[in-house]
Image (tube, rainbow, N blue to C red):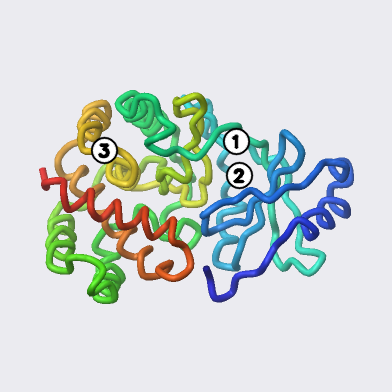
Amino acid sequence: MHADEVDADVALVRRLIATQFPHWSDLPVERVPSAGTDNAIFRLGDGLVARLPRARSRTAPLDKESTWLPRLGPLPLAVPVPLAKGMPAEGYPWEWSVYEWLEGEEATVERITDLGRTAIALAEFVSALQRVDPTGGPPPGAHNFFRVEPLVARDAETRAAIASLHGHVDVEAVTAAWEAALDAPAWSGRPVWIHGDLAAGNLLVTEGRLVAVIDFGCLGVGDPACDLMVAWTFLSADTRDAFRSALSVDGTTWARGRGWALSTALIAAPYYLSTNPVLVAAARRTIAEVLADPTR
């Protein structure tokens, strides 16, 4: 998926564990199928998971997660617990990490019993995260793919993505939607913690209920609108209002959230067009949800 991507397989992970964490060397290693773009995922026994960045550009979040994840809780949904940091070795060029394994399946509409209840659970999670003291938290940067930066800073990249998607999207409609989002006043309030990538692939469900949020690679502090993306990346038209009401979101913040959802989907679609059909399908769905949802 990335020009500088490095392959990782079970044999490599076994060697890394054996030399760096020999107390775990007896655990079976199994690759976890995933459409994720940042890390190759390997389950270690029943209770652990190893995450190996796929490319150099995907290594920046590692130290941030190990520093900040333990300081965010307690939260109403389970989040990853970092346990150990591995070093470059055995031909693998970057640091990597071991976390506790969180049970659950990737969230899909078919696996969720009550999407309305899930919307409220997501709102409660976002609200709790926003209440965590943001002092010293990381501002937007390469470590979180510039999440929470002002939307106008994404204008050139978003318009370039739109231009590259001729024949794949309604260029006139997405341009109008993007420009409407840019018209919303920029955030001028207190910065808050944001997850930065609340999409189906980062939500886990068990027995139809949302139980965990994973992959905090886009974690940072800034504009709360960024975490409203989930209203279009995952929720449906008839559950979006429940999510918004539970968070008491004002109109301008909601408009920026809509812009964040649109921008990230537009940028992702051409980048992964020939390498990640799952992510492209998710981006197409988000774009369709944004266009079908009137600006309010």
Q: How much space separates mark 2 and mark 3, taking CA atoms?
A: 34 Å
The image position of residue 51, as x and y in percent, is: 65, 51
> Which of 280/145 is in front?
280
Q: In this image, 284 relative to 91: left or right? A: left
Q: In which quarter of the image is residue 267?
A: bottom left
Residue at 69% in and 49% down? 42
Q: Where does label 3 land, which residue?
A: 236
> Callout 1, which amino acid?
Pro
> Callout 3, which amino acid?
Ser
- 1 and 3 marks in contact (CB < 8 Å): no
Q: Earlier in the sequence, mark 2 or mark 3?
A: 2
Q: Residues within 10 Å of mark 3 (few under 14, many from 20)?
A: some
Q: Is residue 127 above or below residue 138?
A: above
Q: Is residue 13 above or below residue 212?
A: below
Q: How much space separates mark 1 and mark 3, taking CA atoms?
A: 32 Å
Quadrant where the C terminus lies? Answer: top left
Residue at 70% in and 44% down? 43
The image position of residue 197, as x and y in percent, is: 42, 48
Q: Of the residues tagged 1 and 3, which is closer to the observer?
A: 3
> Callout 2, which amino acid?
Thr
Q: Where does label 1 land, which residue?
A: 70
Residue at 16% in and 49% down? 292
Q: Earlier in the sequence, mark 1 or mark 3?
A: 1
Q: What element carries label 1?
A: helix
Q: In this image, 45 relative to 291: left or right? A: right
Q: Indicate which disc residue 211 carries.
A: none
Q: Indicate which disc residue 67 carries.
A: 2
Q: In this image, 266 relative to 94: left or right? A: left
- 2 and 1 marks in contact (CB < 8 Å): yes
Q: Is mark 3 on a helix, strand or loop?
A: loop
Q: How much space separates mark 2 and mark 1, taking CA atoms?
A: 7 Å
